[in-house]
Image (spheres, coloured by chain):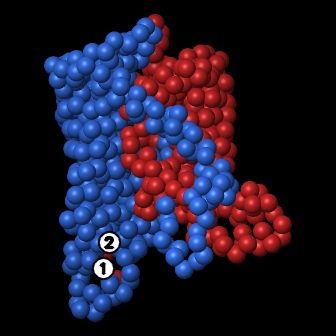
Chain colours: A red, B blue
Amino acid sequence: MKKTSRVNQFLLYLVIGTGAFAIAFPIYWMFALATHSTPDIFSYPPPLTFGDQGVRNFTVLFNAISYARHMWNSVFVAAANVILILIFCSMGGYAFAMYSFPGKRWMFALCLSTLMIPWIANIIPWFIVIREIGWVDNHLALIVPGAANAFGIFWMRQYISSSVHPQLLDQARVDGCHEWLIFFRVVAPTLTPAFSALGIFSFVTSWNNFIVPLIVLRSDRLLTLPLSLVQLTGDPRRGTDVAVLMMAASLAILPIVIAFLISSRKFIAGMMAGAIKG
Amino acid sequence: MADAGTAGIQRKPPGLGRRIVSSWVPYSYVAPFYVLFLVFMAFPIVFTLYLSFHSWDGLSSMRFTGLDNLVRIVRDPVFWIALYNTLFIGIVAHIPMLSFALIVAFILDSGFIRFRHFFRTIYFLPVVASSVAISLVFMNVFGFRGGLINLVIMAFGGERIHWLGGQGEWVRTVIMTVFIWRWVGWNMVIYLAGLQSIPNELYDSARIDGAGWPQVLRHISLPLIKPVVLFSFVLSVVGTFTLFDEPFVLAGVEGGPNRMGLTLMVYLYRNAFRFSRFGYASSIALVIMILTIVVAIMNIRFFREKV
């Protein structure tokens, strides 16, 4: 399909380019607004290019609220999430891929069926459980419950069953490796590609999570970035300093956007595999 | 018991008990998931059912109220507004989103276009961006003064619109725009993967038979991509039943003017965590779960008939 008229080709570029522009422009504009003052933002016409108030907004943001602290909280919670998810989901996926054991089939079906349940609708009793454990206003509530999830287990199982040969396990057994340690000594080091895809996915999910921290966290020093942003919008006395807010929003998505642009191929491939095979 | 019979050729299989004991390694590997599942998923789901028949403020003792919550839900006009908004957003937003995602996927798959990876990356970008940050940006995009959309409208000589204020007639449009903006790339990438998995021989033989691009599209690509489209549609609709971040930020916990931006999940949150009506909020959770199950059953039926 090489031959097509110039006009047609131009039209295709027009459609796809307009869409790409509509998607990219709001993100660009957020970064641009972060470098203007609030009165400028509300002037007519609004600024469309970068201004010179970036440093001022940055300073105000880091002085007025515990933004640095909130960013650290987001990093900490997301990193803890990633580590636990990688460990527990790869263990689960490995068991389902390489072993047969009584009840395996219905256990796996149960695991997959949890993907279909809108878990978040059960946030009320979930919160009660968290309260009974004593994890209200504690980062553990954001880290532990999702440490082993169905998506991760399914994703690791798919990868392990297609990439790990049973001979590898037999070899390790012959070499005298304890059955329970085979996974950690022999299999886990070969799973790097699957780890990076699931890791990126889990990091982003945790970083962007809003409703769970909204319900669980109370004290200012524990907030994560999305809560920090919402907190910035709600100052009834001074009103919202939109410029500072845009700076905060920009800084909240910047690390993810940069990481995504660097490794977008890997990231998209991971997300797709998870969605299609489901 | 479980798998006896399948291994008939081998020696007499060991008893179930012994097999369970000897499988302690895989059990210990899957144990973390099932422990967390029991505590944080299975129990909450059962407890939602239980709570929806009770009145409870979360602190004092529960009072069994039978079907009172259900009756209250049916008589609660705000619930119907939230349900209507949720379904409206869920259904209406998908039509432009899925068609555009499909068109872009076709264009990228056709091979007429260069910079394919570049476009794919741009379209996928919103999927990884924080929904709260994005909603805040769109508050500016749809701002009354200094908003981009109003700027364009005024450039064409129109009257500027009170997108998030006024009588609230535009709030849903804004929420849907943000929703479409966020997820169009995700769907597009799924379709693109589906299109690229279609074997090239099919295209080749069609071309030998003299089929042009439109015919190939209609008779090969579209029918083969249909299951993927349906799958992502169902997944996405179920996702809108619990839409929370965007309406919460854009319209607020009260749902904006005339509650035009109130969704079920925001209403649930408001009842449970602002007014401590845990029992009533649980009935709303029950409605969300029932909606999901209905869609899932419809989906299974549909797939059985068509595929």
Q: How crowded is mark 2: few (under 14 residues within 10 Å), some or many (20 or more)?
A: some
Image mark 1: chain: A
| Label 2 chain ID | A
* B263 or B147, nearer to the observer: B263
Residue at x-position 40% and y-position 34%: B45
Indicate the quadrant where residue B201 lies. bottom left
Residue type, mark 1 in image: Thr
Residue at the disc numbered 1:
A4
Circles 1 and 2 in contact, beta carbons < 8 Å: yes
Q: Residue drawn at (32%, 84%), measured in percent from left and top?
A: B202
Above or below, B191 relative to A75: below
Does residue B208 lie above or below B292 as drawn? Answer: below
Q: Do labels 1 and 2 share a chain?
A: yes
Residue A240: image location, x then y, percent:
46, 17
Residue most extreme to the right: A176
Could you say which disc has been placed on residue B66 in the image?
none
Res B238 quadrant in image: top left
Q: What residue type is labelled 2?
A: Gln
Task: Between residue B38 and residue B157, name the one nearer to us.
Answer: B38
State the quadrant of the C terminus of chain A: bottom left
Q: Is residue A24 in view?
A: no
Instruction: Identify the image quadrant of the N terminus of chain A.
Output: bottom left
For label 1, count other residues whose C-alpha is less than 10 Å away and answer few (under 14), some (14-19) or many (20+).
few
Residue B187 position, x and y percent, is: 37, 56
Judge whether A209 appears above or below A245 on screen.
below
Identify the residue shown where x is 22% and y is 31%: B83
The residue under the point 22% across, 21% down is B67
Count of numbered circles on the image: 2
Residue at label 2?
A9
State the separation of the CA atoms marked 1 and 2: 7 Å
User: How far across and how far down the image is residue B261, in percent?
Assistant: 27, 27
Work out whether residue B298 or residue B109 is closer to the camera in this orientation and state it: B298
